[in-house]
Image (spheres, rainbow, N blue to C red):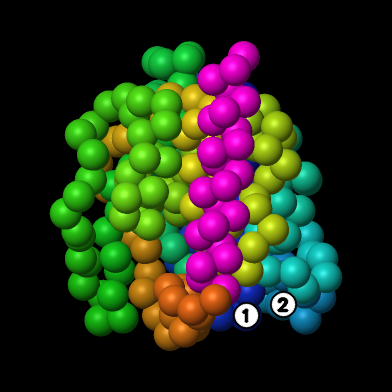
């Protein structure tokens, strides 16, 4: 069985791609499982192979497409994947020891859930790790709970950068939302109205903070673009919830 790691690669993430690979290469998976890493360069000028310490690792699949932003790159990476489970890993982030095994264990132990997430620590430029309050209790997350929390706070209840999800649900939703940012939040909120999820309280990701990341853009958290993103994320999730409730 295969867990597919999908990674959109932009120029700002290239300096950290080696650390992302090291964190993935060190994962110990349950018996019968292996991983593939589907990297998608967002534009033909993004030198992914040159940034990797082991570009010939047979588990690595490198592709490129016209520049379209993280949502397009992730969806294109997903299109080339073959795994039963799909795991997100941004090019500038790092998995913690055991992260993939914990995701797999949660989804195998609870066949009714569609997705799993975990605790995150921010990896600061000085190398320090910073956590934050507000994580939900470890265990099952009720269907719709993420959307309810997001509606109140415009912040997801759990971190979308840690998402591990069953392949059929990503396919059903058409991949990541066609947005310049918040595309991962859009997918997570939609998933939350379709299925129960799971939260692991052990840290699963070191989320790197740096000047080149897309969330540092001034339009990310305010202005007309932000308002439009928030509106369409909520509207799609509401439409899906109404459809599920009628069925």
Quadrant in the rendering for residue 106: top left
Q: Quadrant of the C terminus?
A: top right
Q: Residue 192 location, x and y as percent?
A: 47, 34
Question: SS at mark 1?
Answer: helix
Residue at x 48%, y 74% (from the top left corner): 220
Magenta-highlighted stretch: main secondary structure? helix
Q: CA distance from mark 2 to mark 1?
A: 6 Å
Quadrant in the rendering for residue 101: top left
Does residue 10 lie above or below 118 as drawn?
A: below
Proximity of marks 2 and 1: CB atoms separated by less than 8 Å: yes
Residue under numbered circle 2: 46
Q: Is residue 204 visible?
A: no
Direction from residue 81 to residue 14 in the image, left or right = left
Residue at x 54%, y 76% (from the top left corner): 224
Residue 102 drawn in magenta: no
Residue under numbered circle 1: 11
Query: Where are the magenta residues, as a range?
Result: 225-247
Q: Which mark is residue 94?
A: none
Of the pair 199 and 85, the residue shown nearer to us: 199
Q: Residue 7 location, x and y as percent?
A: 61, 57
Does residue 1 lie above or below 98 as drawn?
A: above
Direction from residue 151 to residue 50 in the image, left or right = right
Of the pair 200 and 225, the residue shown nearer to us: 225
Direction from residue 69 to residue 183 in the image, left or right = left
Of the pair 213 and 220, the residue shown nearer to us: 220
Q: Residue furthest left?
A: 133
Q: Residue 112 location, x and y as percent?
A: 47, 15
Of the pair 132 and 178, the residue shown nearer to us: 178
Q: Is residue 122 visible?
A: yes
Question: SS at mark 2?
Answer: loop
Using a 10 Å C-alpha cutoff, classify the residue at mark 2 as few (fewer than 14 neighbours), some (14 to 19) or many (20 or more): many
């Amino acid at each position: 069985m295969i867990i597919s790691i999908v990674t959109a690669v932009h120029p700002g993430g290239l300096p950290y791609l080696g650390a992302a690979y090291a964190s993935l290469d060190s994962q110990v998976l349950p018996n019968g499982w292996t991983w593939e890493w589907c990297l998608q360069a967002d534009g033909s000028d993004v030198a992914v192979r040159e940034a990797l310490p082991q570009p010939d690792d047979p588990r690595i699949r490198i592709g490129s497409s016209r520049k379209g932003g993280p949502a397009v790159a992730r969806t294109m990476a997903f299109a080339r994947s073959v795994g039963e489970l799909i795991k997100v890993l941004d090019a500038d982030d790092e998995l913690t020891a055991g992260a993939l095994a914990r995701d797999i264990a949660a989804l195998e132990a609870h066949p009714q859930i569609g997705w799993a997430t975990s605790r995150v620590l921010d990896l600061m430029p000085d190398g320090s790790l910073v956590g934050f309050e507000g994580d939900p209790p470890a265990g099952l997350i009720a269907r719709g709970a993420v959307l309810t929390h997001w509606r109140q706070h415009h912040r997801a209840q759990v971190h979308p950068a840690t998402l591990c999800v069953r392949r059929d649900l990503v396919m059903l939703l058409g991949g990541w939302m066609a947005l310049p940012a918040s595309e991962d939040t859009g997918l997570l909120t939609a998933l939350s109205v379709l299925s129960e999820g799971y939260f692991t309280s052990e840290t699963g990701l070191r989320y790197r903070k740096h000047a080149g990341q897309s969330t540092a853009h001034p339009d990310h958290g305010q202005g007309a673009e932000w308002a439009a993103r928030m509106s369409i994320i909520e509207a799609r999730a509401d439409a899906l919830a109404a459809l599920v409730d009628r069925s």
